[in-house]
Amino acid sequence: MKKSGLLNPDLCYAIARLGHTDTWAVADCGLPIPEHVEIIDLALVFGIPTFEQVLNALKPEVVVEGAVIAEGAPERIREMVDTDVEVVTHEELKAQLAECAFVIRTGETTAYANVIFKSGVAF
Amino acid sequence: MKKSGLLNPDLCYAIARLGHTDTWAVADCGLPIPEHVEIIDLALVFGIPTFEQVLNALKPEVVVEGAVIAEGAPERIREMVDTDVEVVTHEELKAQLAECAFVIRTGETTAYANVIFKSGVAF
Amino acid sequence: MKKSGLLNPDLCYAIARLGHTDTWAVADCGLPIPEHVEIIDLALVFGIPTFEQVLNALKPEVVVEGAVIAEGAPERIREMVDTDVEVVTHEELKAQLAECAFVIRTGETTAYANVIFKSGVAF
Amino acid sequence: MKKSGLLNPDLCYAIARLGHTDTWAVADCGLPIPEHVEIIDLALVFGIPTFEQVLNALKPEVVVEGAVIAEGAPERIREMVDTDVEVVTHEELKAQLAECAFVIRTGETTAYANVIFKSGVAF
Amino acid sequence: MKKSGLLNPDLCYAIARLGHTDTWAVADCGLPIPEHVEIIDLALVFGIPTFEQVLNALKPEVVVEGAVIAEGAPERIREMVDTDVEVVTHEELKAQLAECAFVIRTGETTAYANVIFKSGVAF
Amino acid sequence: MKKSGLLNPDLCYAIARLGHTDTWAVADCGLPIPEHVEIIDLALVFGIPTFEQVLNALKPEVVVEGAVIAEGAPERIREMVDTDVEVVTHEELKAQLAECAFVIRTGETTAYANVIFKSGVAF
Amino acid sequence: MKKSGLLNPDLCYAIARLGHTDTWAVADCGLPIPEHVEIIDLALVFGIPTFEQVLNALKPEVVVEGAVIAEGAPERIREMVDTDVEVVTHEELKAQLAECAFVIRTGETTAYANVIFKSGVAF
Amino acid sequence: MKKSGLLNPDLCYAIARLGHTDTWAVADCGLPIPEHVEIIDLALVFGIPTFEQVLNALKPEVVVEGAVIAEGAPERIREMVDTDVEVVTHEELKAQLAECAFVIRTGETTAYANVIFKSGVAF
Amino acid sequence: MKKSGLLNPDLCYAIARLGHTDTWAVADCGLPIPEHVEIIDLALVFGIPTFEQVLNALKPEVVVEGAVIAEGAPERIREMVDTDVEVVTHEELKAQLAECAFVIRTGETTAYANVIFKSGVAF
Amino acid sequence: MKKSGLLNPDLCYAIARLGHTDTWAVADCGLPIPEHVEIIDLALVFGIPTFEQVLNALKPEVVVEGAVIAEGAPERIREMVDTDVEVVTHEELKAQLAECAFVIRTGETTAYANVIFKSGVAF
């Protein structure tokens, strides 16, 4: 079986499919996600898994060169994002969501715990 | 949105589809699952989510009237299962897995943390 | 099997998929529903199930923060909706129907017994 | 729209597809239904719709020439079936279920409220 | 099997799916039908079945509140349509065809034997 | 459009796909047809189209080298079949039906109006 | 099997689906065909089958009331088309190709051997 | 576009998928082909394309290490097959057909012009 | 099996489907590829296979009449492209990518190693 | 995009789906692969990519606890497999291939360069 790292097949596929500048998001469990955007739904119940658990699982495996976060997002969430962060209105974030390659739905119940990441390039 | 309880759409669907005596399982992240059996894969990385988190999320929403566990399963796992438990060989458990309506894959890394539940009836 | 609450798998899935501000509707059996909108068709014959039965089944399981109803809708229907209700023309209601995540078709034969609900957020 | 009778499209399709001797069933909400058998799921919550409501909706539209019921089925259910009724073990009923063209799942919570009907011929 | 009335499963499904104001059509065998519109093709050879046979099969089962016919349509066809009939150019009829829920293709070889029906409501 | 002959696309496809010794059937509207066998359903209502209309539409376009008919089939049906006819029990006919490439369902209401044709070869 | 005429099932289906004024094309093996247009690809190698073989196979089975050909098309190709022919630029032909119900790809290697046919009506 | 050789996309795909000892066939237009076997149907009308044209198109692109032909096959067909040829009954050939990766249907009308080829290995 | 040349079935299919002026691309492993464009993903790990290996595999099998490359592309990549090359901005290249029939993803990690080829015609 | 390691989405998915004792294979480009087994086809042309390149790409990411190789396999291939190796007949290897979760097809042209790996468990 897989030796380490991400275990979720859909997530492993989606990440391997990313190209430079493609965007993807980690979302709380209440974010409205446009119908055409692929959802990788890991949400079990409120709080499981947390935004942080999902982000920490992804950080070692992806290259990012920027992130977008909504104005209401708490500092706790913002600090987890160790790349340039652009703060936009919640409406603007929802608009950019429609361009995402996929959205990972967590069980997070912190309001506005939604971050869109912009893929960097690994070479 | 959903007020409480299970958030995962595939899981909510699968449970609502269960009939009396239908079986389903909660598995660690390494259990080999027959190709024809539906897998609801919540595994993120090793340990997330745990077997216990998933089982506790399900208990309030399902009626069970028995469970099957493999000989190697640790007592910690067995104690979580508050219904009659039949202990079988690991091979027998894998054979019964093929009859399951679905298997929930967790991030659990406790060996033999695999339990097959037999649906009870709610009336 | 499922212990309580909604039994319909499609309905359980659709509700678990809702995000904050997503809309969905409960409709009488004659409402024209745009082809691209998912229909969860529980209609058996005229009157079965009623609008009220379906709404009462849903209320305990969803968070709503508003509703839209057409001008012709009878008071009896309106009173069932215990959230802010905006009254629009029947044409406007049909236009908003096109944005719904899903429509539950009942057997209701009360004219204009169609309500669009706006999802609230559970945290 | 449809002038009268059955409103459910899946149900209307399934009935129109029946041939002489084909079997179909009306089931309570807890019956385990083999994966390969088509399920027309009208179940909303416990008790809605009832076995009787569904059967009465179907009687005017289908020709039957026999029925099979399980030993435990209450007299109330049996009396609704106005054709020759063969009583079998619950196991035998479940075996015959696998041959059904489709099963209509109701919200019925009366134990053993499951009847398999054998199609007659209309000419 | 089905006791009476329409026997074609696709047709039974399509009619049960109609809502108030939805449109559908009965067409001769030569009408060009837009690719995205569902075709229920009952045409066998020229003349079988006729426009009249199909319309008479449908009349007892549907509620209509209007019809649209092309200018060239012969009186014989028009008389079969016992509801308000609007006469439009053949081009306009073809345009409205694109909005139809479905088109029933007959074997009719009478030129312009195409009628679009507007669903009424049964309550 | 097509100049003459069969108009039904599914039927035209199915016939063009036939090879020597492949079997196909023309059936009355009540014949039970195994789920895995392709059904080309031309049935509108009882009697439309008739067995004879369908058979006459097919005769000019196919090569047959034999037919199978059930014991109960009326002489009228048998006379339409101008090739060697083997008479079998109704059960045997239903068994052979499972091997058919396709079955054309007519509106015929003559009991046992079911004939299985064995394709000949056109060279 | 089929007695005579066109043998290709996809082609038989496509032609039976044509309505009056629908267009379709016979193309050489190098014509760029828009992704959304159905391709019936009979091309084996350069020259097999020829444009002429395909056109001659189709002529007995279809009604056409016009054709469109590109300026560069050789006289040899044009003469095969025994109906009114409109000559357009190659760009215009490619634009009209996008409206075709289907395109038959031959092995023809004569430049500009592409003709769009407009269906006539058979009654 | 493709510079030379086989032009048919399905055929190019099927050949690239072949492994050592996999079997495939070139058939006349009347061979009955089991439903589960992929058919690459190049048949236009009787005689187009011929068995020889198809075989000659394939020979330069595939490695074969044997062939199977039915007793009735004419010498003309057999001579085209420049590899070891095993002659079997027509029934045996049809049985082996069920194991083929794919069957290419030609327009050939020579009786028994059916050859099953066994893939060799190119290294 | 296939005697020589390209082995990848998807690639063999895609090339056989190309028409004159259709475009396709060979890309490094980081190029963002629009969701609607077919991706033939041969990337294993960084550097395997290289851009050059893929291009050399394709050159003998396709006819091209031009190429488009982004400004940043290194000379090494440009020299491999033995046809007229148009240099555009990286944004323009990404825009043209959306019109490609397919994109072959290599393991190349040379920045801007992306070339869009325009199909020529082989006759 | 992905930071390192395997780039192929299908391969990343397939590995993440493996459970303990599940088997998978790396094959040369000529191995016959049963139709029901998933093929991840990385083969470009003979020799690209090599068996070794693919195996080296996988080793860091998977846990194996055994391998099966055919008698004819050269020592060079066997040495690359740093786990217990069972040598079986080529027929036995092909039989076990049918149980594999997936087969990675390389461009390898070394005869018998086919190894089936048995997944270990990572905890």
Image (cartoon, coloured by chain):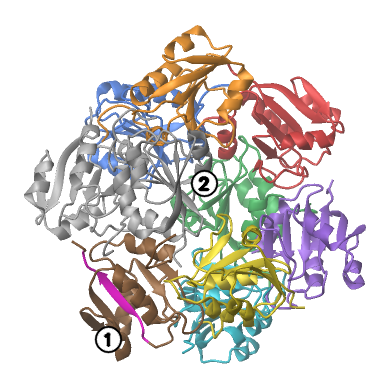
Chain colours: A purple, B cyan, C yellow, D brown, G orange, H blue, I red, J green
Query: Visible in this render: residue J10?
Result: yes
Mark 2, chain letter? J
Which residue appears at 58% of the width and 69% of the height? C114
Q: Position of residue B30 (x, y in %)?
A: 62, 70
Q: Is residue B61 magenta?
A: no
Mark 1, chain letter? D
Numbered range of the magenta stretch: D112-121
Q: Residue D21 versus residue C114: which sits nearer the camera?
A: C114
Q: Residue G12 versus residue D48: which sits nearer the camera?
A: D48
Q: Secondary structure at mark 2?
A: loop
Q: Position of residue C14 (x, y in %)?
A: 60, 68
Q: Position of residue J55 (x, y in %)?
A: 66, 51
The answer to whether A68 appears left or right of B104 in the picture is: right
The answer to whether A5 appears left or right of I57 in the picture is: right
Dots 2, 1 in contact, CB < 8 A: no
Q: Residue H44 versus residue A57: which sits nearer the camera?
A: H44
Q: Position of residue H30 (x, y in %)?
A: 28, 33
In the depicted structure, whether residue G63 falls above or below residue D118: above
Q: CA distance from mark 2 to mark 1?
A: 72 Å
In the depicted structure, whether residue A62 falls above or below residue D67: above
The residue that disc 2 covers is J72
The residue that disc 1 covers is D79
At label 1, the amino acid type is Glu
Which residue appears at 50% of the width and 50% of the height? J71
